[in-house]
Image (cartoon, grey):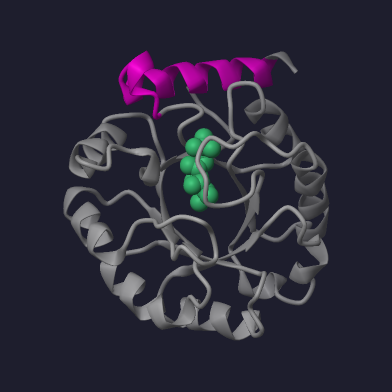
Amino acid sequence: MSRNFEITASLICGDPLNLERSVCDIIGADIDRIHFDVMDGVCVPRFGLYPEILVGVRKLTDLPVDVHMMVTNPEPYIEMYAKAGATIFYVHAENNSNLHRTLKLVRDAGMKPGVVLNMATPVCVLDYILADIDYVLLMAINPGIVGYTIIDAVYTKIRDVKTLIGGRSIKIVIDGGVTLESSATMVRAGADVLVCGSSTIFRPAEGPLAELTKKFLKSVTTQLEES
Ligand code: DX5
Ligand code: ZN
């Protein structure tokens, strides 16, 4: 079935004792990309995945792997993640005193630069860096915790970012709050990529990941066709 949005599987929602199995499940499903959360326990109240895991993932798949840096200072890790095989390298706009420089370092390292905005961060922080980014990731929850409930203001924010980027080839990605109920509205508002986690496809008690992905895609595409 053709669709006008991509889905990316949030690996941190996989089985912590068997991530290899989780990666193989993702490869075997109709999933476009892998989302790779990195956390330092300071920037967000949790610890996440790390570069050695990405090296292992790369031995299993050529799928794009998008690294979401929820750390206080991402710059020292740019080369490390580029070497490990990251596709996109997302940095948060908050607490970054030289975002332009960070994004340039990301591109120079051979990765696609993406900027992440937490809910309270205004869209205007993108005004002067639109030429330097390929992706904008909007947090629809407060970052770092899986399974949080969506903050509804994200729908307005998606439309605002869509207007701001105009004809530029920048993609809008939504992280958190992606559910069977919210996804079609997100895509209609302008979202290009949805991060799927514990609310959608990582629910082992409800069935295998490939089946839940199929169900999710069918439901969202049907809702989009009906609108
Ligand atoms: C980001 C989160 C997400 C999360 C989103 O801070 O870690 O990547 O998995 O999906 P849900 O909320 O469905 O687990
Ligand atoms: Zn994330």
Using the image as rendered, state which of residue 2 and residue 204 is in the foreground: 204
- Which secondary structure dominates the residues rendered in magenta? helix
x 75%, y 57%: residue? 167
Q: Is residue 214 magenta?
A: yes
x 37%, y 30%: residue? 30
Quarter of the image where the C terminus is located: top right
**Residue 44 quadrant:** bottom right
- Count all numbered tags in the image, as a single digit: 0
**What is the x, y in percent for residue 22?**
26, 37
x 50%, y 23%: residue? 217
Q: Is residue 151 magenta?
A: no
x 83%, y 51%: residue? 160
Residue 114 relative to residue 124: left or right: left
The span shown in magenta is 202-225
**What is the x, y in percent for residue 138?**
66, 52
Placement of 68 over or under 130, stated as above or below: above
Placement of 94 over or under 57, stated as above or below: below
Using the image as rendered, state which of residue 17 and residue 153 is in the foreground: 17
**What is the x, y in percent for residue 126?**
74, 68
Can residue 6 be seen here? The reply is: no
